[in-house]
Amino acid sequence: MKKRVLFFISVSLFAAVSCSRDLPRMVSRAEMRALDDWTENHLTGKNALPPFSFVYGNIPSSEVLGRSTITAAETRLDADRTALSRIWTDGETGLQVRCEAVVYQDFPVVEWAVYLKNTGTEDTPAISDLKGMDILLPADDSFIPLLHGRHGDYEQAECYAPFIDTLSIGTEAVFSPPGSGKSTDGPRGWPYHNLQTGETNGFIVVLGWPGQWEDRFSRVAPVPGNAIRVSGGQQTFFSYLKPGEEIRTPLNLILFWKDKDTDASQNLWRRFYLAHIIPHFDGEPQQPAFEIQCSPAKGSIAYLQKYMDSGAKPDISWQDANWYPSAKGPYGPNGWRDKSFPYWLDPTKFDTWLNTGTWEIDSTRFPDGFKDFSKFAKEQDIQFLVWFEPERVGDPTSWLGTNHPEWLLPNILGDILDEGKPEARMWLTDHIDRFIKENGLVWYREDMNGGGPGPAWRNNDGDGRIGITENHYVKGHLAYWDSLKARNPGLHIDACASGGRRNDLETMKRAVPLLRSDFQWNHMKNLLRGNQGHTYGLSSWFPFQGSAAYDTTMYAARSFYLPLFGTAGLTDGNKGYVKRVYDEHRAVAEEMLYGDFWPLTPYCIGPEAWIAWQFDRPETGTGVIQAFRREECDTSITLRLRGLDPRAEYFFYDFDEGIPGDDPGNGLRFKGKDLMGTGLTVTATENPQAKVFLYRKVK
């Protein structure tokens, strides 16, 4: 059947917008033209090559789309975004393929996802090799492309370590989580990449899928010599669709960068992230915060008051796990083992908090519930957070295990509530929504422990339906969060999955990571240098991240300063320490959130080298430098700063000599050109020692 176009949108609108409007700092006209060209070539042009692919039965998608009827539409979402929809309908089988894209007018960014639906009355042929992104990106002649990436989270010092893969002809780089279904899990499980295709140009490529994904950067034949084939999607999918059934691909994103180095391109990403990815409240991105763990039990209000009296008023009061009935489940000192129960671990060696599945307050431990505490917190302008883990049902005798076992997918370390079942998702949405409203929650913290849902998804797939459980589950999971946010305007979501193991793009559009990794406890090897490395590696990608320091030394606390920061509990003996780190964090947190991030040393987590970085805010003329002398380092290092005004002078303030106030007077005074030329010499007399400097442009 001959292809028929019913409605077509020209790209000229985007070119006119991007060439005429004022652009944010760091965005160039050349980058916006690159976006326009790509949009025309892959989405809106008369002969546009779709940026995705699949196999339908044994037919490549190009043939299926070529015989389909096409409709197209455009919607202006706001001043900075235009939505594009392109729909192909196959008259032979009823398969509908819909590509939904958003083109940004203030940043050189495009994102899209693809939806496939059976509009016919019979099962479709099998869909396989489904790649939501399948494109060629060009490299400059004679330049060997470099792929800049990071490790994911796996609770080690090396998490978020930067690496570079060299993409020579005949090679490829492949990434995915290690089968867990947690989207930022493992050394090769980070779905954010910076593909450098020239000395001063490249593409940031991101895949968003809170599940088991895979992406591939290939120069293996038949890829043309100066190109890289970039493809990605749900790692495994081979399934027919039933009548009325719809699936989707991951969300895909490209940022085009030109005339920059890779550090500057990452700051372009950070600025885009703050403008369009991170959740906003009252027109502002998620703000920095100081958090404490404070359970709403007897005496908790007095404990909260103690913090306020000390001058360290928290922004968030955090109720962690084990507030629900958990004493009688399989885990803990009295845990039991049933031979039919699919656990390969000894349940008695784990804490009772793993006995999840009844999401009601334990009246034995919390006879007064949470309402009085949350009311007091609200009156003090302190946000109340409660931990949940709704997907993992650790106790088969819990409410969910007893009343709705048909909703559960068998798994290790607890069954998995199938969010792909509409009735299960609706119950969960209604139940948690009621809890949020009745108990005055401002923050909903969602965790996902154990080996992840991946094995449960795979084991539930039937014949000829590989990957279908995961696809419907991921759609349901995102719909659940969207429903909670729609029903509770202003609700904050904290994404946690045994630390920072589910922080893909779709998740970060809805949530923030208050805990970037479970690598935070004092007994862990190389804890402090490792967390310095975490900040170094992750700050290029996430302006907002969080953790907490439980070692009460200044070296430890300064190793954990982030936009979200917590520290050890308040006692009569550590009031001075808590107040000091509270004040220091307040001074640096906003700079870390809004500033451009500049690495000032190579990455290293060993004892032999300093590590240092800078957050610079050219709009305000302020910034912060954090430098860490390790155990085997020389006493001094000279750091060449970035991003300053070479014509200006700057006051510098050493935190070891006190924190400057709003009117700090004179600090150490340096010229911008000297700081970026000969550099700033930092001396640490202690070993190890953390140095923090705040700077402000001289008016």
Image: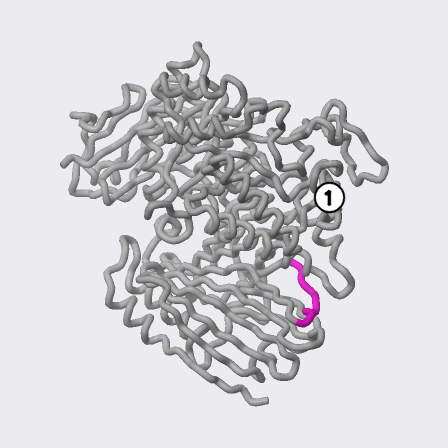
Kindly tell me whether residue 479 is visible in this rendering: yes
Relative to 182, say whether 55 is above or below.
below
Relative to 657, say whether 142 is above or below.
below
Tell which residue pokes out farthest to the top in this image. 573
Tell which residue pokes out farthest to the right in this image. 339
Can you say which quadrant of the picture contains the N terminus? Answer: bottom right
Tell which residue pokes out farthest to the left in this image. 699
The residue segment tinted magenta is: 235-243
Q: Picture quarter containing residue 539?
A: top left
Left or right: 661 with respect to 175? Answer: left
**Residue 688 image point, x, y percent:** 43, 21
Between residue 255 and residue 425, name the one nearer to us: 425
**Residue 305 image point, x, y percent:** 41, 19
Type of the residue with mark 1:
Asn
**Residue 566 image point, x, y percent:** 45, 27
Between residue 189 and residue 684, name the one nearer to us: 189
Residue 669 in the magenta stretch? The answer is no
Between residue 381 and residue 610, name the one nearer to us: 381
Can you say which quadrant of the picture contains the C terminus? Answer: top left
**Residue 501 image point, x, y percent:** 57, 43
Left or right: 315 with respect to 229? Answer: left
* Dominant secondary structure (helix, strand or loop) of the stretch shown in magenta: loop
Residue beneath the point at 55% across and 32% down: 519
Residue 241 in the magenta stretch? The answer is yes
Callout 1: SS: helix
Residue beneath the point at 62% across and 51% down: 425
Mark 1 lies on residue? 403
Q: How many marks?
A: 1
Left or right: 27 with respect to 100? Answer: left
Kindly tell me whether residue 610 is visible in this rendering: no
Relative to 107, say whether 417 is above or below.
above
Q: Picture quarter containing residue 596?
A: top left
